[in-house]
Amino acid sequence: MSRAVTIHAYGGPDVLTVEELEVGRPGPGQVRIAQKAIGINYIDVYQRTGLYKLPQLPAVLGLEGAGEVVEAGSGVGDLKVGDRVAYAGCPGAYSEERLAPADRMVKLPDAISYETGAAMMLQGMTVRYLLRQTYPVSSGTVMLFHAAAGGVGSIACQWARALGATMIGTVSSDEKAALARSNGCTHVINTKTEDFVARVAEITGGQGCDVVYDSVGKDTYQGSLQCLKPRGLWVSFGNASGPVPPFDLTLLRGSLFATRPSLFAYTSSRQELLDNAAELFDLVARGQISIAVNHRYALVEAAAAHRDLEARKTTGSIVLVP
């Protein structure tokens, strides 16, 4: 038996319940993992509330974690008992032990701790595809990144700095502004006291940005589009303020482009997954990116973690510790 955090109905943090569940032995192509740390991400909130529907209820929440392989099923050739692994995008993470598909596991380098591994996979690999594939960021790129002090944003600040890009970041407090600057954000806008559209125009001399990365959604999408230069790209990859409503395509004036990417679409093959993780691990190992695990909660405190995340009380990454 293993303790796990489940939901039986969609709703607020109170729907998260701790239960004892039978894990079972791994089937073909599966591994059983004793989890050492579990990542919390905003997509977990979307799934808990029902914004993103789960295949069925009840369900164990969570998509990201790191731990040790304790048993391997038949047909698993590249993982063995004792291997340190990390993953993202595998439902059922909020548990002490779990079964998982071996082909979605990535071996965790010895130099990277379990907590760092659990905190970096979904967020770090998201930044990798956003900055390296969705829009190839370079030293000449001028970009706007919303929520620059969050888990994804903190990594994006550092990655953009490593690429030499000009990054404009939005935050919701002076404390978060200082954090974004310390991570390498070139210009920081506090949306509580400043109009980000006007400030972007001022910073860019009216030219606008090449690309806007928007994980906030409903509250920012129109302003995000106004911050783009002609033929610029708006990347909508989250809904922290609520989903983007249907909108008139004339908002894309200036021949703007819009995309709604997902991590799975960029890591659907085993090789794509390994390539993405390898570049992330390399930058972390070389010290160009530091993963800030700023908040730790016991597994049974998952509801409290969700409340703090939704109240914007957190910065950097959040992990549950079984």
Image (cartoon, grey):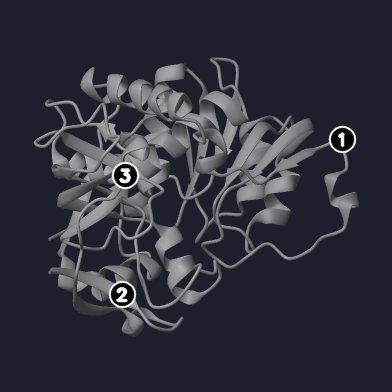
Q: Residues within 10 Å of mark 3 (few under 14, many from 20)?
A: few
Image height of 182 relative to 52, above or below: above
Considering the image in quadrants, where does the C terminus appear? Answer: bottom left
Type of the residue with mark 3 = Pro
- Where is residue 24 drawn, in percent x and y? 20, 61
Left or right of residue 14, residue 215 in this image: right
Q: Residues within 10 Å of mark 1 (few under 14, many from 20)?
A: few
* Front residue of this view, candidates 289 and 116: 116
How far is disc 1 from disc 2 in space, using C-alphas?
45 Å
Question: Image quarter for residue 182?
Answer: top left
Considering the image in quadrants, where does the N terminus appear? Answer: bottom left
Q: Which mark is residue 255?
A: 1
Type of the residue with mark 1 = Ser
- Where is residue 184 drawn, in percent x and y? 37, 30
- Where is residue 88 drawn, in percent x and y? 36, 45
According to the picture, the residue beneath numbered tag 3 turns out to be 28
Residue occupying the point 16% across, 73% down: 300
